[in-house]
Amino acid sequence: MRPCPYAGAIMQITITRPDDWHLHLRDGPEMAAVLPHSARQFARAIVMPNLRPPVTTVAAAGEYRARILAALPDGAAFEPLMTLYLTDSMSPQEVWRAAASGFVRAVKLYPAGATTNSDSGVTDIGRCAAVLAAMEECGLPLLVHGEVTDPAVDVFDREKVFIERVLQPLLLRHAAIRLVFEHITTGDAADFVRACGDNVAATITAHHLLYNRNAIFAGGIRPHHYCLPVLKRERHRQALLQAATSGNPKFFLGTDSAPHSRASKESACGCAGCYTAPAALELYAEAFESMAALDRLEAFASFHGPDFYRLPRNAGQVTLQQEEWLLPAAFAYAGGEPLVPLRAGEPLRWRLLD
Ligand code: DOR
Ligand code: ZN
């Protein structure tokens, strides 16, 4: 990071162009609406496969990738890093095909029923033993939505219980698997990742760094603060801030930006997901600034992810300027539906310069 050399002048920070290691781009017109936001902020993104139907094969991932590239705005340099959706019936051959493809970079584990479009997810991780063994052998990372779906477990405890019931046993059976614990939300998850070997890392979202669970109920129910895993209590947010700003290479940026139309969020049964893509870096900068750790933002946003994924760091740079501005109240989405971002119509402290 390079602080502005002019004392008393406008504060700017310039960092290596970052990547988003966890992103929902959707498909069709929805994708066309959101893709420019991510392509403006990030050079690459790990693209989630929870479409309908899910992206379960290398062939389908290749077609999805081609649709993303075709939808990019003119002149945008953005590389989608594709993932496969793990099912009970995936074959180890598919894993080997993925590893050889050069464009599938990971396999995503959704416990069946844990979140949006997860009904085809894994019902029993024991059924995936041969696939996990193949991943261990070829080094393809497993990305984990770490929540149990047992309705008897309190929704705020589902990540912690997942560590005990699923993650620890999985890592005992597959000790060499390269694994990213996605969008961690608790101090328990951060501690767990720190205690594991170098083969285990975690992504952290901007919204879990900036908000605790009170935000879901501030003066009334706030559907745009509802995501999965759900926001947790303040001590967990503090633990995530510590982890993200610690400089530990196991923790890196993954927005989990997850667009849903306003109607599907502001509903009697609203969808989970925070749309953060339009101002993702600005939100992370605010979180790091709150810890007086802006000098650690570059490593978290631009170095730790590619290092874990064994990809080169980006060559370009981006500049953030300290300047208050208002995020639009909504963006156009598919079919004329509005898409409400996190922080809609509210001020941001940083602005990404073009
Ligand atoms: O909040 C979320 N939204 N969490 C997920 O795991 C999925 C995502 C989505 O696809 O909307
Ligand atoms: Zn996600």
Image (cartoon, rainbow, N blue to C red):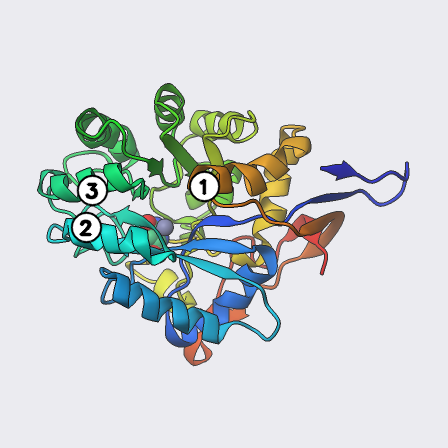
Quarter the C terminus occupies: bottom right
Relative depth, front residue between 323 and 95? 95
Residue designated by label 3:
134
Q: Say which mark, if any, is on residue 113.
A: 2
Percent of width and height locating residue 141: 33, 42
Q: Residue at x 40, y 71 (%)?
A: 66
Sequence-wise, the earlier of marks 1 and 2 is: 2
Relative depth, front residue between 194 and 62? 62
Percent of width and height locating residue 5: 87, 38
Q: Say which mark, if any, is on residue 172.
A: none
Relative depth, front residue between 337 and 312? 312
Single out the residue that lies furthest toward the top. Answer: 195
In the image, is residue 261 above or below residue 132? below
In the image, is residue 341 above or below residue 211? below
In the image, is residue 237 above or below residue 63? above
Sequence-wise, the earlier of marks 1 and 3 is: 3
Q: Quick check: marks 1 and 3 in contact, CB under 8 Å?
A: no
Say which element carries label 3: helix
Q: Is mark 2 within 8 Å of ligand 1?
A: no
Percent of width and height locating residue 268: 29, 60
Q: Residue at x 45, y 60 (%)?
A: 80
Say which element carries label 2: loop
Say which element carries label 1: loop
Percent of width and height locating residue 223: 40, 54
Estimate how packed mark 1 is, as few (under 14), some (14 to 19) or many (20 or more) residues with alpha carbons within 10 Å: few
In the image, is residue 313 above or below residue 341? above
